[in-house]
Image: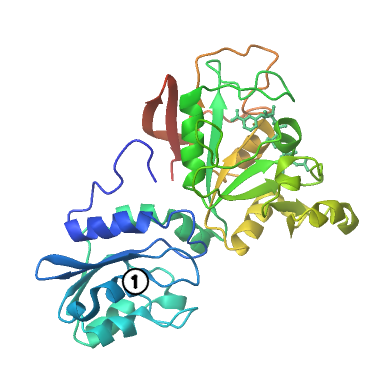
Amino acid sequence: MTLFSDPAVGIADPYLRRAFALAERGRGTTSPNPLVGCVVVRDGEIVGEGFHERAGGPHAEVVALDEAGERARGGDLYVTLEPCNHFGRTPPCVDRLLADGVSSVTIGMRDPDTNVSGGGAEALEAAGVQVRFAEDPRPFEVQNEGWLTRIRLGRPFVRVKVALTLDGRPALAARRRSRITGAGGRRITMLLRSRTTAVCVGVSTVQIDDPELTVRDADEQPQGRSPQRIVLARTCVPDTRMKVVCDSGGSTLVISDAVPESALADVERAGVRVLRYAYAEGLAGALRAVATDGVNDVLVESGPSLFSALWRGRLIDELVLVTAGGMSGNAAPPLFLGQADAEGADLAPVFYAVETGLADGDAVTVWRPRV
Ligand SMILES: NC(=O)c1ccc[n+]([C@@H]2O[C@H](COP(=O)([O-])OP(=O)(O)OC[C@H]3O[C@@H](n4cnc5c(N)ncnc54)[C@H](OP(=O)(O)O)[C@@H]3O)[C@@H](O)[C@H]2O)c1
């Protein structure tokens, strides 16, 4: 996912590029499934389009073939991810492609989840369908890095967003709510929330800021869908007066087993779902619990403690820094708590900048870890 550039720029084939754009429409709602887009072409004309919207719903290929109807016979199908060849919640797409008689299939990327759904391309070829792959699978892999991260690492893709003052502080004073960025930074936050499956904050930020964590327009009105809301905690349960609890709309509390069951009764009564992880496993355990719950990607809006723990655990896949033009000074907490590694491991450029842009006077930089 990119903020300032076209992610489809490396896709040479115009029909695959269209399938990629369709897949994007499912961003934030397909977990635990991948984003998939599909077009059916007959005699150079698009006769069917589809994308996968949510788990349990029809796959992109089925939506596109439904729209194409009889015109699919002898046509060419373009799909961002290798069609599945297994019974999940829905029948195998390969069977449907064969039944509808498409003559060729062009695929953005292979399905790496071979135990579950692999062999789609081979099954199509064995049935006489011409199968091609995109020259460069990378844009399709980036599009589905949430799903790929969950499959490969057993945790969601972790995007961390922090607002900073010019002197690099994430708050104006310790344990006080502060508004750092202007309208531009706020807009970027809303955009990131609208594109994520779940938004996470630490319980300490809940207690201090009482955030809503929803997607709202400039007039504070709800706008489109809001992500699932997740509170990360080890030992401390949020107060039931906080918005993510009393106005829960399906919030989830991810808390360690150091907390007795009885301490959770009030938040559960308020409608909050509780996921447990072993205290000894730390944040990695918390994120595993989130992935097991079927979440492919999270946006963490972190204060210094959570940021530092994620950094130390090498659990950040992307860091979005929004810098505004004010100073906060010495009384404010730094972003990174504690001492940097004595051998200089924290000082070495373990992250590199991948994107930069302006948002109404706030500066946005996007960073990725060097692999
Ligand atoms: N500038 C920004 O973008 C931004 C964003 C968010 C917050 N903030 C500011 O940051 C301040 C709060 O920062 P904070 O450092 O107190 O809170 P934080 O970093 O947002 O969250 C810390 C909480 O995360 C939980 N947690 C779970 N696993 C953890 C682990 N392994 N290590 C550390 N914590 C873990 C802790 O729960 P337990 O207490 O149960 O251990 C802790 O209370 C506020 O002033 C807020 O306004 C700024």
Give x and y (percent) for residue 355. Answer: 37, 34
Quarter of the view holding residue 106: bottom left
From the viewer's perspective, is 178 left or right of 137?
right
- Return the residue nearer the eye: 331 or 195: 195
Colour scheme of the rendered structure = rainbow
Residue at x 74% of width, y 36% of height: 204
How many marks on residues?
A: 1
Pointer 1 residue Cβ closer than 8 Å to ligand 1: no
**Residue 370 x, y percent position in the rendering:** 43, 41
The residue positioned 46% from the left and 39% from the top of the image is: 191
The image quarter containing residue 200 is top right
Q: Is residue 330 left or right of residue 154?
A: right
Q: Is residue 176 above or below residue 150?
A: above
Q: Position of residue 179 (x, y in %)?
A: 61, 22
Q: Residue at 59% of width from left, 60% of height from top? A: 291
Q: Is residue 342 left or right of residue 148?
A: right
Is residue 161 or residue 213 the one in the foreground? 213
Residue holding disc 1: 63
Element class at badge 1 = helix
Tell me which amino acid carries mark 1.
Val
Split into quadrants, the picture shows ligand 1 in the one at top right
State whether residue 348 appears in this view.
no
Whether residue 116 is visible: yes
Lateral position of residue 267 relative to residue 148, left or right = right
Q: Nearer the viewer, residue 208 or 84?
A: 208
Report the residue that reaches farthest toward the left.
43
Horizontal and vertical percent position of residue 321: 50, 30
Residue 193's place in the image compared with 19, above or below, is above
Q: Is residue 228 above or below residue 172?
A: below
Q: Residues within 10 Å of mark 1 (few under 14, many from 20)?
A: some
